[in-house]
Image (cartoon, rainbow, N blue to C red):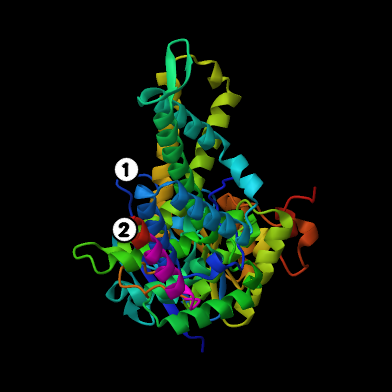
Amino acid sequence: MATKILEINDLTHRYPDGDGGIFDISFSVNKGEFIILAGQNGSGKTTLIRHLNGLFKPAAGTIRLHGQDIFKDLTHTRKTVGMVFQDADTQIVCDTVFDEVAFGPENLNLDRTLVNTKVNTVLDQLNLTELSSRNPATLSGGEKRKLTIAGILAMDPEVIVFDEPFANLDHPGTQSLLALISELNKNGQTIIMATHDVETVMRSASRLLIISRGRLVADGKVTQMIRHLESNGIKPPCTCTMEPSFPPMSMTPPCQ
Amino acid sequence: MNPFMFKPGNSLLHGLDTRCKVFLVCMVSLSLVNANFPACGILFGVLAFFTKNSGLRIGQTLKHLRYFILFLVFILLSRALTISGDPLVSLHGMTISTQGLYQGSLVALRFFLIMVTGLVFSATTRPSSLKSAAQWYLKPIPLVPEKRVAIMISLALRFLPLLIQQAQETSNAICARCGNLEKNPVKRFVRLTLPLLKKTFLSADHLILAMEARCYCEDRTDPEFKPSGKESIFIVISLTFWFCLLLA
């Protein structure tokens, strides 16, 4: 039986101006899953994922991490559920790659030797060792994104939440990042990815959640949920890249 | 290119502990307050050696400082013309005095040496270690949240170039819609600053969330310093030099 990491029950969040928000969302996240959270712009993806590590407080509903309310120990929550934001530039806070990766472990007040060991391990894992003394401002978009992931990995999270990770990346950058995320998932990392670009990532994912106007409208295996994409304003995958197992072909547009 | 930007290297100064370098910069600056020409000459020689040793090209460094040197020439001339003394040259009622020229050149030379000291310091010191040194120096001062100050320095160093870049982008976007034809400087200023401020505050909001997401707090791991072992020699020499100048 799969181990439940996160349980979200009847989650509701309303913005003061009355626009947007999320309503009565319930689902759970099992260990090792790769979940795509798909939805068109303004559907509530970002609002939902910002609840998962306690950045936003819900108006109603609960989120439990290993059975415990996430707000009971926010430091533990944020250490366990790492978050990679859409804009890498506003997530990077330090002026060298090494310091940026060390920022999280330093916040946990770990011993300096342990911080250095963790940082060096992660830099090595993500092939960033040669860039360790570089200023993040001088990195490419793909490298910056990798750096933000490294900053999260150094905190040893169980779940990594990505918010539109492929935004503003070129094709090689997207492929390289996807390979890295898939590799992390194969090594047991649980991944939740908010995106409207389902096609890029569907082969690697195990589950697809579709959110529309703040409500969860579909939740299941990628192959079964793909038929609901277009009706919820999300671009369905191109037929030529799909495997025969993805039904129904008639719903997808022809390849350009 | 910014001449004050950190340039990686393995020189003597690169390896020196930043706390020691901050101390040395303070000592050099204090020494220069009373330095006469021979003392300035010695400091000039020392700085020239370290500039070369740090991998900075003297010619290029001077080229970067050309506008500052022009400013120094202005200081020299104004001093030479305003301080009374034995006339050296007289032209159209304006007299350059020997004492004025001496004072002017000494002041200009002191400013020049301070500027070069700052340049060599910033070129051989990582901004991150500068932040750590500031934290270390502020730690004994009561009521000063040294860790908060350090993170503020770090954020300022990180986001200042980003702000400049955003200002440039906003300015380009305004120019692309012929905003440059607007002659009223107030309107031009408002058109540039409002979107820039909006963008900056939004970025600041995102930054707060990103820092919170990584458990930011003030009870953080202390910074690490890696002394090269030569710090004591540098400190003794600088103190001796300063003491000699004090006695002279």
Q: What is the chain letter for disc 2?
A: B
Q: Position of B243 compared to A246: left or right? A: left
Q: Which mark is residue B33?
A: none
Quarter-of-image position of residue B213: bottom left
Left of B191 or right of it: where is A251?
Answer: right
x, y percent for residue B175: 57, 25
- The residue beneath circle 2 is B247
Q: What element carries label 1?
A: loop
Q: In this view, does A230 lie above or below B107?
A: below
Q: Nearer the viewer, residue A94 or A1?
A: A94
Residue B231 located within the stretch drawn in magenta: yes
Span of residues in magenta: B227-241
Horizontal and vertical percent position of residue A148:
54, 64
Q: Do labels 2 and 1 share a chain?
A: no
Identity of the residue drawn at 52% across and 51% down: B44
- What secondary structure characterizes most of the magenta part? helix
Label 1 crowd bin: few (<14), some (14–19), many (20+), radius 10 Å: few
Which residue is rendered at x = 40% and y = 25% of the image? Answer: B86
Q: Quadrant location of residue A9?
A: bottom left
> Quick one: A236 or A191, which is closer to the camera?
A191
* Amino acid type assigned to the residue bearing label 1 in the image: Asp
User: Closest to the observer: A136 or B46?
Assistant: B46
